[in-house]
Amino acid sequence: EVEADFPSLPPGCSIQLERVARERVLGKIRSVLAELNQFIPETLRTWSEEVGKPLTFGRFIEVTGLTPVQVLSSRSWSEWKALADRQAMPVDPDIDQARKALPRIALRSDPELLSAIETLGQSEGVEEALGRYDTARQTALHYLLWGKEGGRVGVDSLEQSLRKWHANASIVADAAEIAAWRRTHQQVPLHPLGDLPFESDLLLHGAYGNAEIKAALGLASLEKPGATGVGVIHAKEIRAYIHLVTFQKDESDFSPTTRYRDYPISRTLLHWESQSNTSQASATGQNYLHFEERGYTILFFARLMKRIEGETAPFIFLGQAKALKSYQGDRPIAMTWEL
């Protein structure tokens, strides 16, 4: 935020730092982050004397001011506590792979997915999760936990996926604690959308990863994660276009032909550009221009930037388009959608 002159501030707000002050602030931040290997264990060792309240992941985040991604990017919560207590490190069978799920979980917000992760932290959690959640939810859960298709994880079924996860005792306990904290610290209210013409458990303003979105819409399976690296997904079976929008496009992640001018205009209006090869006369262009008559649903998911402190940022579900207010041009078509 400091380096980029605070791009995430609300509209109408700005922070301007004098040059020397800016350099000092950045220097202090860098020095603190470089010393997390000392800072976190020392804070944990002196927790009882300094804080006087039971240690939990959420309370640690609140007291220290560190972000969940900062804490979880290199070590699990259990590993930090073991390091602080000078105890042996956890030896979960898949700890290197499973550890990567913890910052993802900390960035999600769907209470049902988070509750499922809490359930998996119980002794009979796998059986309960298998009985409670349908295939779409289990598939979304698989990708949240493992981040890749079943073949690359070494599992042939969703049940195997959950049992493999459950075998990593320290990670499972950490994930349940992180999910419980995240579920009770929602940044915005979440709402189900009851007027979609197809089945979906997605919540308005919920934070989801790419594969979790596709799993919820029946576009991903354990074997195939669906289309990747694209901003538009045409779901022909349910007659829908799913748009995955990144507002701030870094040159290292987006080529000149994919650096579309996408931005919010107001609380309900969104400027969005089609893919660079889409013309108004094309089948896709006509589906957009006449989406209501053709029975198409237009869904938007958006994020400010591609990464949050090095972790892939989730998308926020903005809901469905109500109307196409205006459009112009070809390849790409510039459109203004009303949500």
Image: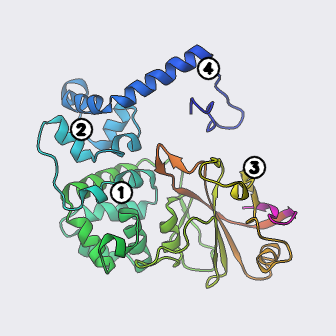
Dot 2 or dot 4: first in sequence order is 4
Against 244, residue 311 (above or below) is above
Is residue 92 at least partly visible in the picture? yes
| Residue 259 figure quarter | bottom right
Residue 198 - label:
none
Q: Nearer the viewer, residue 183 or 175?
A: 175
Q: Label 2 near label 1: C-beta < 8 Å? A: no
- Upstream in sequence: badge 1 or badge 2: 2
For label 1, the residue is 101
Residue range (magenta): 326-339
In the rendering, at what x and y percent does residue 290 appear? Answer: 82, 77
**Residue 96 x/y as whole percent:** 27, 56
Please tell me the numbered disc located at residue 55: 2
Do the residues under discs 4 and 1 have CB atoms within 8 angstroms?
no
Q: Which quadrant of the view contains residue 115?
A: bottom left
Q: Earlier in the sequence, mark 3 or mark 4?
A: 4
> Does residue 25 sit above or below 207 in this rendering?
above
Q: Which residue is nearer to you in this view: 150 or 120?
A: 150
Q: Is residue 279 left or right of residue 296?
A: right
Q: Nearer the viewer, mark 1 or mark 3?
A: 1
In-front residue for pair 272/257: 257
Tell me which amino acid carries mark 4: Leu
Q: Residues within 10 Å of mark 3 (few under 14, many from 20)?
A: few
Q: Amino acid at mark 1?
A: Ala
Number of callouts in the render? 4
- For label 4, the residue is 17
Residue under pointer 3: 266
